[in-house]
Image (cartoon, grey):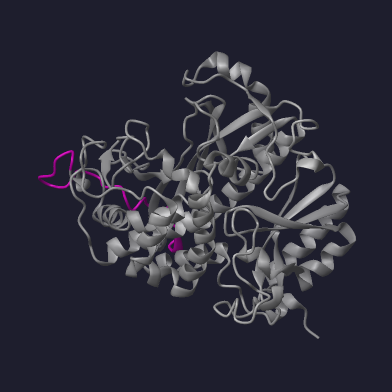
Amino acid sequence: MSDFAQRCGANDAARQAAVAQTLDRIEASGIDLVRFAWCDLHGMLRSKTLVASAVADSLRDGVGMVSTLMLKDTSDRTAYKVFEQGGASELPGFEGASNLLLLADPASFTALPWAPKTGWLQGQLWFSDGRPVELDSRRVLQQALQRLAQAGYGLNCGLEIELHVYRIDDSAHDGALDPELAAWPGLPPKVSMIHPGYHLLGECFSDMAEEPLRIIQHTAQALGLPLRSLEIEFGPSQLEAVFDVTDALSAADNMVLFRSAVKQALRRAGFHATFMCRPPFPNIMSSGWHLHQSLCSLDAALAGKPARNAFMRDTSAAGSQPRDAQYTLSEVGEHYLAGLLAHARASAVFCTPTANGYGRFQPNALAPQSVLWGRDNRGAMLRVVGESGDRATRIENRLGEPAANPYLYLASQIYAGLDGMERQLKAPQATDSPYGAHEEKLPTSLNEALDALLGSPVLVAAFGRDFVNYLVHVKRAEADRYDLAQDKTDFCRREYFSRI
């Protein structure tokens, strides 16, 4: 009888070699526990922990996981009535909280630097009959990248991620772990700041925050993540991590692992890290996730040549002015930019998926308000960076929040950009006043963003009607609960600050 990996069509020679290498590493390093992890709809890792002796069988036959893990909103409530007749009729295979199988990628194996003798593997979900679970967000990005590859391009991404880190004052007595105060979702720990803020890149503040900064550095580097810098951000207790450019799938994988790893490593040392946009305190600065992106030609890579940045142009287009897209970007770059603009409102829910994140879109706050682009303008939604002949020419999307599911964030960029390329859309002139009076504003709430997505035939077709209906169903549960909450700060404190 064939094993599950064979039935999935995943057990090729490369995977078999990776399985053997991983099992050798586990034995040689003395690892006795291995976490089999998967990224949920909200960009957060879930995992099962197996003893080392069970790893070999699990790499062949998968690890069982309850299918309702795919149906949770951000409070961990199941958004579909899976135990009622017809309650999950839109999602065949999910009725009755049925089982899915997590098949891990053996090449993803790493040792967790904060957890002694503990390894980690990343996987994707399959139905028990060997069919892929198409709603899995990582698979959504893989499909988008396949579409982009058919057009002859790959996507490269650089990440700028803002976060807040606090010192836990007393986790044993502040309510977070008090069983008498347990709730669904529960309280976060009581915290204090690691620096007072409002002194951007202040070196003295870097010294104040050195302990958590060092933990973040050591954790990221031990995991092999391409960390480039750690910075003191403007807001109280706010930091920023910047990563080198990688291919899009690696960038998304890195983001998922970084967030989970940083939260765990810092918690062990007495710190609370949050990637929510706006922590529930009176005087904070919102956190953003600025996504730098450029296309590369796959033809060059196939020919064994260095992949050229497809957004770069050697000289400005004839007759162009600095506010024209082709003063800096190639024709392909302009079309991609115009696609991002055309679908900005519809893609907002992928970039800013929490009810909390829409409070960030305020004037003069280094966050966008309108559907605009600018040349090296940090107030515009899209910031074009570079000059003619600059191999680092790129588009920075400033719409995202650090809580976004990276697979969906990147997929939305691909589909929007591809539509611009296929229709050869032209971009308007760059803005000089990103907070002026403009007709097209970004959504101001999660429900408005969901409506914008449903109103986009292009993105609905690109992601697939089934996936969009599923996403909207789950996110509506979150958005409606937020809208009905009498104490919205408490909602954000429990649902986002304690968990994201």
**Dominant secondary structure, magenta:** loop
Where residue 194 appears, as percent x and y from the top left, is 62, 22
Question: Magenta region: which residues?
Answer: 300-323
Indicate whether 252 appears above or below 493. below
Q: Residue at x 51, y 48 (%)?
A: 246
- Residue at 49 percent across and 44 percent down: it is 356
Q: Is residue 274 magenta?
A: no
Quadrant of the rendered structure where residue 454 is?
Answer: bottom left
Which one is in front, 386 or 364? 364
x, y percentage for residue 152?
A: 38, 65
Q: Name the side, left or right, on which 1 lies relative to 245.
A: right
Q: Residue pushed farthest left?
A: 319
Q: Nearer the viewer, residue 96 or 107?
A: 96
The C terminus - image quarter: top right
Q: Residue furthest top?
A: 204
| Image-based side of 324 in relation to 458, left or right | left
Give the answer, above or below, for where 454 lies relative to 332. Answer: below
Q: Which residue occupies 40% across, 59% down?
A: 414
